[in-house]
């Protein structure tokens, strides 16, 4: 069983979002990276029938996420993420100036929604593992009305999840589902993700990919203000998104991750995102 668990930890828990497993007691994981998405339009409508909304300014959302997790016991893992954000807009498109009140061009640096997780193993047998997770996102974001720039949702989020995973020597697969409850009149959403990974060349490389689906269970009435012109962390977002990640292990327990992804749905940026991350574990 110890060998089986080591394979699961190697393939799944080295990715911050793969939380269908818990860490061994006194074992931990830390990562820091950089991600960017730049866009000038939003998708709108139903996921299977999309239109698009052009924006009066080009928007750049850059993030330095700092993430850590630690095994309190063999069944209980806690984690925290602090996203440092730099959001900015380019010059206003002249086509919008004549008929619409547009926000000012600008930039904003601040902390996004600080995230805390508690992950508890509720069932484990052979290569299978199931967990219950409670996620809390603090209302630590910043908003600037004159530019419409936000660094996160203007709300607290409470999100219970259930996850299940199955792992072997060279691969793993897992899924999670839950509900996002947000304060401040934001919509309530269901969230489901499925992901998997393959290890090859004696653990030198790890490739993984996944799908994420978020749908509104109830529409929100939050006042987004000028953020409707930037599309940053606004209410009633729904999406179907895909992502791919590739990591290389250049030295001992260190890994470098490259990732890209894209979403389709209501009020979702019409552009892919890119990221690079350095991680280590013990």
Image: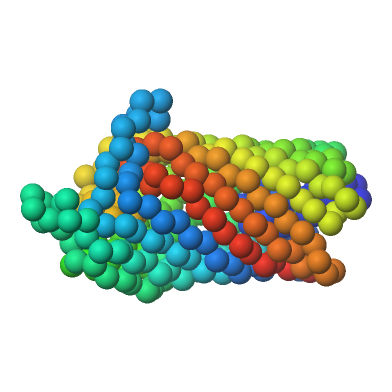
Residue at 34% of width from left, 58% of height from top?
A: 59
- Identify the residue at the far front of this view: 94
Location of the C terminus (image quadrant):
bottom right
In depth, the one of 3 and 34 nearer the eye is: 34
**Residue 124 location, x and y as percent?**
77, 42
**Left-right relation of 36 to 248:** left
Image position, residue 101 (x, y; %)? 10, 56
Q: How many numbered markers are drawn?
A: 0
Whether residue 232 can be seen here: yes
For residue 163, side relative to residue 123 (left or right): left
Q: Residue at x 32, y 46 (%)?
A: 41
Residue furthest top in the image: 48
Q: Position of residue 256 (x, y in %)?
A: 71, 63
Name the foreground residue: 138 vs 202: 202
For the rendered model, the colour scheme is: rainbow
Q: Which residue does the image show at 24% across and 67% down from the upper left?
A: 105
The image quarter in which residue 47 lies: top left
Which residue, as the protein is rendered here, is positioned at the far bottom?
109
Which corner quadrant of the image does residue 248 belong to?
bottom right
Residue 120 % position (x, y): 65, 51
Vertical side of 172 occupied by 16: above or below: below
């Amino acid at each position: 069983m110890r060998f089986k668990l080591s394979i699961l930890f190697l393939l799944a828990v080295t990715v911050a979002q793969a939380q269908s497993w818990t860490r061994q007691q006194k074992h931990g994981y830390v990562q820091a990276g950089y991600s960017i998405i730049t866009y000038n339009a939003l998708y709108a409508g139903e996921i299977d029938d999309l239109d698009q909304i052009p924006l009066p300014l080009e928007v750049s959302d850059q993030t330095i996420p700092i993430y850590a997790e630690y095994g309190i016991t063999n069944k209980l893992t806690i984690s925290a993420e602090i996203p440092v954000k730099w959001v900015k807009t380019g010059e206003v498109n002249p086509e919008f100036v004549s008929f619409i009140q547009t926000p000012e061009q600008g930039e904003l640096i601040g902390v996004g929604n600080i995230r805390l997780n508690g992950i508890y193993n509720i069932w484990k047998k052979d290569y299978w593992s199931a967990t219950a997770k409670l996620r809390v996102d603090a209302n630590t974001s910043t908003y600037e009305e004159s530019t419409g720039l936000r660094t996160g949702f203007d709300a607290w989020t409470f999100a219970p999840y259930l996850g299940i995973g199955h792992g072997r020597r060279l691969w793993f697969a897992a899924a999670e589902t839950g509900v996002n409850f947000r304060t401040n009149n934001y919509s309530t959403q269901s969230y489901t993700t499925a992901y998997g990974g393959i290890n090859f060349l004696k653990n030198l490389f790890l490739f993984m990919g996944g799908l994420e689906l978020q749908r509104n269970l109830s529409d929100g009435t939050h006042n987004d203000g000028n953020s409707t012109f930037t599309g940053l962390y606004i209410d009633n977002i729904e999406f179907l998104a895909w992502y791919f990640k590739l990591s290389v292990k250049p030295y001992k327990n260190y890994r470098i991750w490259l990732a890209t992804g894209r979403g389709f749905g209501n009020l979702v940026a019409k552009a892919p995102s890119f990221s690079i991350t350095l991680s280590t574990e013990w």
